Amino acid sequence: MLLSGQMAVIPIVTIPSPILREKLHQLPVEEVGSEKINDLAAHMRETMVAANGVGLAANQVNKNVQLFIIDEKLALENNVPNAFINPEITEYSREEEEIEEGCLSIPKVYIPIKRSKKIKIKALDLEGNKIKFKARGFLARVLQHETDHLNGIVIKDRQKKDSGEST
């Protein structure tokens, strides 16, 4: 049993787990900022760090809520939160870049993925504050990858789409 304040690494769900293919439920506003959600985010952060990841979505730890976290250093360098609740990418640049991506739910697989170089995103932070900003480069890529997870999309789906194959 965990004592208050102790962190736990949560098992990461891998494909073909069905939850990775689900569009996750929006988190009700009244639950944002709750101890339950803050604890989940903290455990997800611990899990992501232990797995050497830069982002982790709730369905990757078998939770059906629209929540993802990103690397704390990446968030600090870009002056953005490291947790995103009910995120929505509202704009994608036409300019794209193809870079190899990995995924904690598809271990040891790296796939070249085309993504927009710049995006606009809106979400709630862990305190329930509305956030809205432009992201570019690696941050934009991570935010797109994690938002895909919340919509039931994994990198193998992007690979098929980019190459013109049917899913």
Image (cartoon, helix red, strand yellow):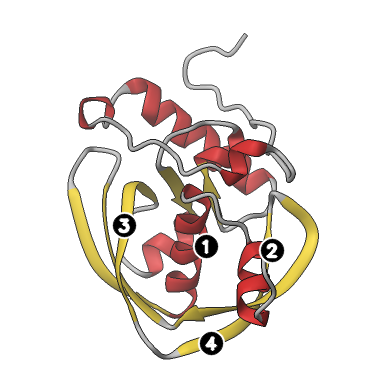
Identify the element where label 4 is drawn.
Answer: strand
Name the amino acid type tagged 2: Lys
Name the amino acid type tagged 3: Glu
Depth check, front residue: 154 or 99:
154
Name the amino acid type tagged 1: His
Coordinates of residue 162 in the picture (x, y in percent): 62, 79
Q: Is residue 115 above or below residue 41?
A: below
- For marks 4 and 2, the one nearer the N-term is 4
Coordinates of residue 47 in the picture (x, y in percent): 62, 39
Q: Which of the image's four quarters has the N terminus?
A: top right
Q: Residues within 10 Å of mark 1 (few under 14, many from 20)?
A: many
Identify the element where label 1 is drawn.
Answer: helix
Q: CA distance from mark 1 to mark 3?
A: 12 Å
Depth check, front residue: 34 or 49:
34
Q: Residues within 10 Å of mark 4 (few under 14, many from 20)?
A: some
What label sits on residue 156 in the rendered view?
A: 2
What label sits on residue 97 in the rendered view?
A: 4
To which quarter of the image does residue 77 belong?
Answer: bottom left
Kindly tell me whether residue 50 is visible in this rendering.
yes
Name the amino acid type tagged 4: Glu
- For image coordinates 72% across by 72% down, the residue present is 111
Disc 2 and disc 1 in contact, CB within 8 angstroms:
no
Which residue is disc 3 drawn over? 88
- For marks 2 and 1, the one nearer the N-term is 1
Q: Residues within 10 Å of mark 3 (few under 14, many from 20)?
A: some
Identify the element where label 3 is drawn.
Answer: strand
Label 2 vs label 1, nearer the camera = 2
- For image coordinates 39% across by 36% down, the residue present is 25
- Farthest residue toward the right? 108
